[in-house]
Image (cartoon, helix red, strand yellow):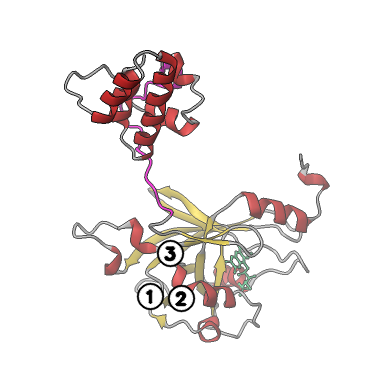
Amino acid sequence: MILDLKDLKTTEKQYYLQHVVAPRPICFASTIDKKGNINLSPFSFFNLFSSNPPIVIFSPARRVRDNTTKHTLENVLEVPEVVINIVTYDMVHPVSLASCEYPKEVNEFIKAGFTPEPATIVKPPMVKESKVKLECKVIEVKPLGTEAGAGNLVICEVLRMHIEDSLLDENKKIDQRKIHHVARLGAEWYCKVDETNLFQVAKPNTELGIGIDALPESIRNSKILTGNNLGQLANVHEMPVIEASFDDAHLKNIIQYYSINPEEMERELQLYAKKLLEENKVREAWQVLLSAV
Ligand SMILES: Cc1cc2nc3c(=O)[nH]c(=O)nc-3n(C[C@H](O)[C@H](O)[C@H](O)COP(=O)(O)O)c2cc1C
């Protein structure tokens, strides 16, 4: 299927874009108007765009139904400050409740059962239940259009972060496994980030990876190794060589058992290398593959 966005109704554009540009982190924005009315609403059109200056952006869009603007947008135009509370799994249902279109004077802290906690630099309160809060100054609001569905970029400079101590390890670093973010996808789909679905990808270091094109042909054209496996192998910064000291019982078995059939041996070695790569053992996988090359 190929879609030209200009041929779609706004609801259809929203439907397809939100399903594919996903998952999106959720900003739970606390804002205040000049009279002191507090608002708390979730926004998944949200992300980090710069570390220095520290900039995050979220987008309260014009309502698709009637092209009206959201209270959050009106508030930041009156008082250009916001607390962005990061949404975690244990708060997702009341966060969703806070997205109901309550009248302006209704405080969603009360409706959704969250505890306001005074911020230290800005006027809107923080959400006590959120494990990470960002006190922000709104430096610019950029409307992206005037039609229903048009976003409004609320460009925020992060002034101060509050991080719950329970998320930190002994070196005061954030343990990613402990945050349990939730993120929004299409329609009513959400996802939860935890130890069962987190994984690490080794960063290419300052020394360049050799690249897929530098892999031996038998590896590059393998029917067994996947694109991800090739990416792992090609991330080494120089072509590995056979290490005489590499001693692996299973490798020895394969070589002994399949010595009369080189094709079978290559297949077995690649299957074993694939298993090692799944365990992130890139050096070992290379040693196994080099036995066949
Ligand atoms: C998880 C979640 C994410 C949402 N993301 C957005 C968004 O990025 N932009 C938007 O305009 N509305 C979004 N909404 C809907 C708003 O939260 C909703 O319109 C809310 O009533 C706005 O409140 P306000 O008028 O008090 O500012 C989202 C709702 C939920 C539950």
What's the residue type where badge 1 is placed? Ala
Look at 52% across and 86% down and name the residue there.
110
Secondary structure predominantly adopted by residues drawn in magenta = loop
Q: Is residue 198 magenta?
A: yes
Per the rendered image, the range of residues in magenta is 197-215
What's the residue type where badge 3 is placed? Cys
Mark 3 CB lies closer than 8 A to ligand 1: no
- The residue singled out by tag 1 in the image is 119
- The residue singled out by tag 2 in the image is 124
Secondary structure under badge 1? Answer: loop
**Disc 2 to disc 3: CB gap under 8 Å:** no
Q: In the image, residue 224 lies at what x, y percent?
A: 48, 28
Look at 37% across and 21% down and name the residue there.
210
Q: Residues within 10 Å of mark 1 (few under 14, many from 20)?
A: some
Q: Quadrant of residue 85?
A: bottom left
**Position of residue 241 in the picture relative to residue 30 (left or right):** left
Which residue occupies the foreground of this view, 257 or 186? 257
What mark, if any, has residue 136 been given in the picture?
3
Which residue occupies the foreground of this view, 43 or 222? 222
Secondary structure under badge 3? Answer: strand
Residue 246 in view in this figure = yes
Q: Is residue 277 magenta?
A: no
Q: Earlier in the sequence, mark 3 or mark 1?
A: 1
**Position of residue 168 in the picture relative to residue 235 (left or right):** left
Q: Earlier in the sequence, mark 2 or mark 1?
A: 1
Q: In the image, residue 186 lies at what x, y percent?
A: 64, 58
Q: In the image, residue 40 lies at what x, y percent?
A: 53, 75
**Disc 2 to disc 1: CB gap under 8 Å:** yes
Secondary structure under badge 2? Answer: loop
